[in-house]
Image (spheres, rainbow, N blue to C red):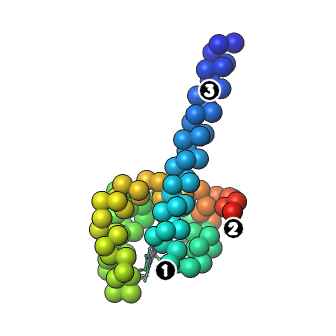
């Protein structure tokens, strides 16, 4: 019985912490990406999980590079070069994967 309780608590905390990460990632997306990628949720759902994972590996380096190479994305350069981006990229990744094309999820508040 105690064992079962332990498993239950473990699962509870685990789900809580991953929810929190997704929420943080969503905040990053709304604050940092939405002003250029206005399609929001549709933009995220354009790509499959695998693609998001690839773009956000190594602390989001591939994604940063796409933007750093594009004049049109100049406004975002400072952000993509910042430590803040590298730090938050983990949350961002979790959020993006959660709502990728093949995830079957839709953000609740939209
Ligand atoms: C200042 C505007 C700007 C901001 C901010 C911005 N982007 Fe972009 N993004 C662009 C532009 C412009 C391109 C197209 C680059 C190109 O192909 O020349 C692009 C391309 C992309 C692509 C690749 C599209 C493709 O077809 O391969 C992805 C994915 C992407 N952005 C995601 C994001 C995410 C996630 C964020 C937030 C962390 C973000 N962008 C923030 C302007 C922006």
**Quarter of the image with the C terminus in it:** bottom right
The residue pinned by badge 2 equals 110
Q: How many other residues sit within 10 Å of disc 3, few (<14), some (14-19) or many (≥20)? A: few
Disc nearer the start of the sequence (3/1): 3
Q: Which mark is residue 36?
A: 1
**Farthest residue in the top direction?**
1
Q: Quadrant of ligand 1?
A: bottom left
Location of residue 97 in the rendering, given as x and y in whole percent from the top left corner: 55, 58
Label 2 vs label 1: CA separation?
18 Å
Q: Which residue is mark 3?
A: 9
Give percent across and percent down for residue 24. 51, 54
- The earlier-in-sequence mark between 2 and 1 is 1
Q: Residues within 10 Å of mark 1 (few under 14, many from 20)?
A: few
Secondary structure under badge 3? helix
Q: Residue at x 60, y 78 (%)?
A: 39
Label 1 secondary element: loop
* Cβ at disc 2 under 8 Å from ligand 1: no
């Amino acid at each position: 019985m105690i064992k079962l309780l332990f498993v239950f608590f473990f699962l509870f905390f685990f789900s809580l912490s991953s929810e929190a990460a997704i929420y943080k990632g969503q905040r990053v997306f709304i604050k940092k990406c939405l002003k250029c990628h206005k399609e929001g949720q549709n933009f995220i759902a354009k790509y499959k999980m695998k693609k998001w994972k690839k773009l956000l590996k190594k602390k989001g380096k591939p994604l940063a590079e796409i933007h750093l190479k594009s004049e049109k994305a100049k406004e975002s350069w400072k952000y993509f070069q910042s430590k803040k981006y590298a730090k938050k990229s983990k949350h961002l990744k979790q959020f993006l994967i959660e709502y990728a094309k093949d995830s079957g999820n839709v953000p609740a508040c939209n």
